[in-house]
Image (cartoon, rainbow, N blue to C red):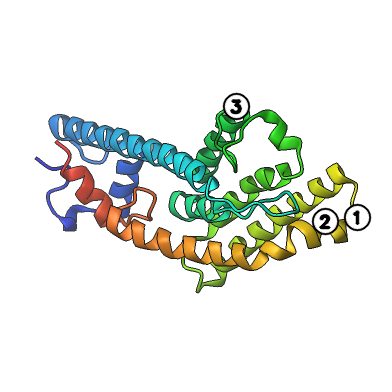
């Protein structure tokens, strides 16, 4: 037995009740079954999201090791791609969680930062500003969605990249004692084109994976939500 007899029986109020776990149908057995299915649906979706958080933390760690050392001390890596990918696919909240797990592992000594390094000292070194900058990057990327053809997606993504670079430049200048202009030329300007391309490719990858993997982070319309709940045994 389903929570709703047909699509004609589904109203916006019904959908709101399903999402909040409140009563969606009247009658004892049917109502109880609907609540149980909604609860099972929530547990399954929450578990999938936590698995994706762990996977993206691991992906960021792996892509951080693909690095080319440069004289400035800031290596050329795929970290920007990984962080942007997490933001586009997971959204700002779970993207922050994934990057938080990644950084926490590095702080605890796991060799997840570039060059198979780890330790809390990395956060206060010459490259530490860029690690701090991952948080505003993933948060801003995650607020706009992966369709960079829309200004509402492109502007937050570029703003996040700019904030990440500004934090990186600031900490590099503070640690080395170099002027901000010289620091920007050393650790930001040479990487801008690569980072913009990384964000673009991350958006393309996130859209492709979301379509193929039925992302639990994608927006779900009311009819799709009800279909999912109805098929949970």
Q: Is residue 21 visible?
A: no
Above or below, comparing residue 46 to residue 214 in the picture: above
Q: Are marks 3 and 2 in contact (CB under 8 Å)?
A: no
- Disc 3 versus disc 1: distance between alpha carbons? 31 Å
The secondary structure type at the circle numbered 1 is loop
N-terminal label among 3 and 2: 3
- Residue 83: image location, x then y, percent: 54, 50
Residue farthest left in this picture? 1
> Which corner quadrant holds the C terminus?
top left
- Disc 1 versus disc 2: distance between alpha carbons? 6 Å
- Disc 3 versus disc 2: distance between alpha carbons? 28 Å
Q: Look at mark 1 in the image and give the residue it sits on.
A: 179
Above or below, comparing residue 185 to residue 216 in the picture: below
User: Which sits in the foreground, 193 or 20?
Assistant: 193
Q: Look at mark 3 in the image and give the residue it sits on.
A: 109
- Residue 124: image location, x then y, percent: 76, 36
N-terminal label among 3 and 1: 3
Give the class, few, some or many, for how many residues have Cα within 10 Å of label 2's Cα (few <14, many ≥20): many
Q: Quadrant of residue 52?
A: top left
Residue farthest top in this picture? 108
Give the class, few, some or many, for how many residues have Cα within 10 Å of label 1's Cα (few <14, many ≥20): few
- Residue 145: image location, x then y, percent: 48, 60
Q: Are marks 1 and 2 in contact (CB under 8 Å)?
A: yes
Q: Is residue 161 visible?
A: yes
Q: Using residue 100 as the reference point, say whether residue 133 is left or right of it.
A: right
Q: Look at mark 2 in the image and give the residue it sits on.
A: 183
Q: Using residue 32 as the reference point, say whether residue 73 is left or right of it.
A: right
- Residue 140: image location, x then y, percent: 60, 54
Q: Quadrant of residue 42?
A: top left
């Amino acid at each position: 037995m389903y929570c709703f007899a047909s699509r004609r029986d589904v109203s916006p109020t019904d959908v709101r009740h399903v999402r909040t776990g409140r009563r969606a149908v009247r009658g004892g057995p049917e109502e109880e079954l609907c609540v149980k299915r909604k609860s099972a649906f929530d547990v399954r979706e929450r578990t999938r999201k936590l698995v994706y958080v762990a996977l993206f933390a691991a992906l960021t760690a792996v892509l951080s090791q693909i690095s080319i050392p440069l004289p400035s001390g800031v290596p050329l890596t795929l970290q920007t791609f990984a962080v942007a990918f997490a933001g586009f696919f997971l959204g700002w909240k779970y993207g922050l969680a994934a990057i938080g797990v990644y950084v926490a592992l590095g702080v605890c000594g796991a060799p997840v930062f570039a060059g198979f390094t780890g330790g809390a000292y990395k956060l206060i070194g010459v490259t530490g500003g860029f690690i701090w900058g991952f948080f505003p990057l993933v948060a801003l990327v995650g607020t706009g969605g992966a369709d960079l053809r829309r200004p509402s997606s492109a502007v937050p993504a570029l703003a996040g990249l700019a904030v990440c670079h500004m934090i990186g430049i600031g900490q590099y200048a503070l640690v080395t004692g170099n002027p901000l202009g010289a620091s920007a030329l050393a650790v930001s300007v040479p990487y801008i084109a690569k980072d913009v391309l990384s964000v673009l490719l991350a958006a393309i990858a996130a859209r492709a994976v979301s379509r193929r993997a039925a992302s639990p982070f994608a927006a779900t319309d009311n009819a799709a939500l009800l279909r999912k709940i109805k098929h949970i045994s």
